[in-house]
Image (cartoon, rainbow, N blue to C red):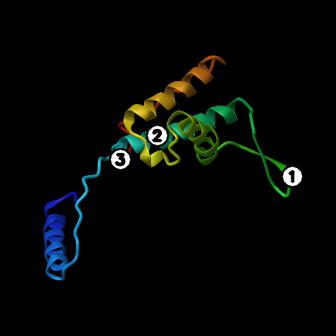
C-alpha cells in the first residue's frame, strides 16, 4: 500500500474476505531500491555499452544454430552478460529488482575495478536522472 486510497480499498477487501471465512495474511515488503536508483542503474548499463562500443569492441553471441553473431553492445546485453552473472555469483539472486542498494554497490565495485584495471573509467550516473 502506498497511499490512503489503497489503504481504504485494502480494509474493505479484508473485511469482505473475513466475513466470508477466508484467511487473510498481511506481509510487509521492503523496497529494494528507489525509482531513481533503478533509473541510474539502467543508465549505467547504457554508459558501459557506449564505452565498449567506443573502444571498438563487439559482443559475440553463440546461440543461433551454433553460428556466431557479432553485434554492438547495448544496455540489455550489459545487464544480461556483465551485470547479472556478477550479481548471481555474489548473491545467488537472479533478478536485478531483488537486490538492495548495498548489493548494487558491490556489483558496481566489481565492474569499476574490472574497467579501471584496463584504464577505462565509467562513472555511475547521478541520481538526478530524468
Q: Nearer the viewer, residue 54 or 68?
A: 68
Residue 61, compared with residue 20, is above or below; it is: above
Residue 7, compared with residue 88, is above or below; it is: below
Q: Nearer the viewer, residue 15 or 6?
A: 15
- Sooner in the amino-acid sequence: mark 1 or mark 2: 2
- Mark 3, residue position: 35
- Mark 2, residue position: 41
Q: Are marks 2 and 3 in contact (CB under 8 Å)?
A: no
Image position, residue 31 (x, y; %): 31, 47
Q: Nearer the viewer, residue 64 or 59?
A: 64
- Mark 1, residue position: 67
Residue 3, compared with residue 46, is above or below; it is: below
Q: CA distance from mark 1 to mark 3?
A: 39 Å
Q: Are marks 1 and 3 in contact (CB under 8 Å)?
A: no
Residue at point 43%, 34% (across, down): 103
Snapshot quadrant of residue 127: top left
Image position, residue 33 (x, y; %): 35, 43
Amino acid at each position: 500500500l502506498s497511499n490512503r486510497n489503497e489503504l481504504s480499498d485494502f480494509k474493505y477487501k479484508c473485511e469482505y474476505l473475513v466475513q466470508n471465512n477466508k484467511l487473510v495474511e498481511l506481509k510487509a515488503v521492503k523496497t529494494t531500491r528507489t525509482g531513481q536508483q533503478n533509473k541510474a542503474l539502467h543508465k549505467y548499463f547504457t554508459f558501459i555499452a557506449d564505452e565498449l562500443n567506443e573502444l571498438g569492441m563487439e559482443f559475440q553471441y553463440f546461440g543461433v544454430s551454433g553460428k556466431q553473431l557479432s553485434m554492438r553492445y547495448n544496455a540489455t546485453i550489459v545487464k544480461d552478460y556483465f551485470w547479472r552473472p556478477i550479481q548471481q555469483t555474489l548473491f545467488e539472486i537472479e533478478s536485478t529488482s531483488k537486490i538492495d542498494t548495498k548489493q548494487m554497490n558491490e556489483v558496481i565495485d566489481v565492474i569499476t575495478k574490472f574497467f579501471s584495471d584496463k584504464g577505462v573509467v565509467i562513472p555511475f550516473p547521478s541520481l538526478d536522472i530524468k
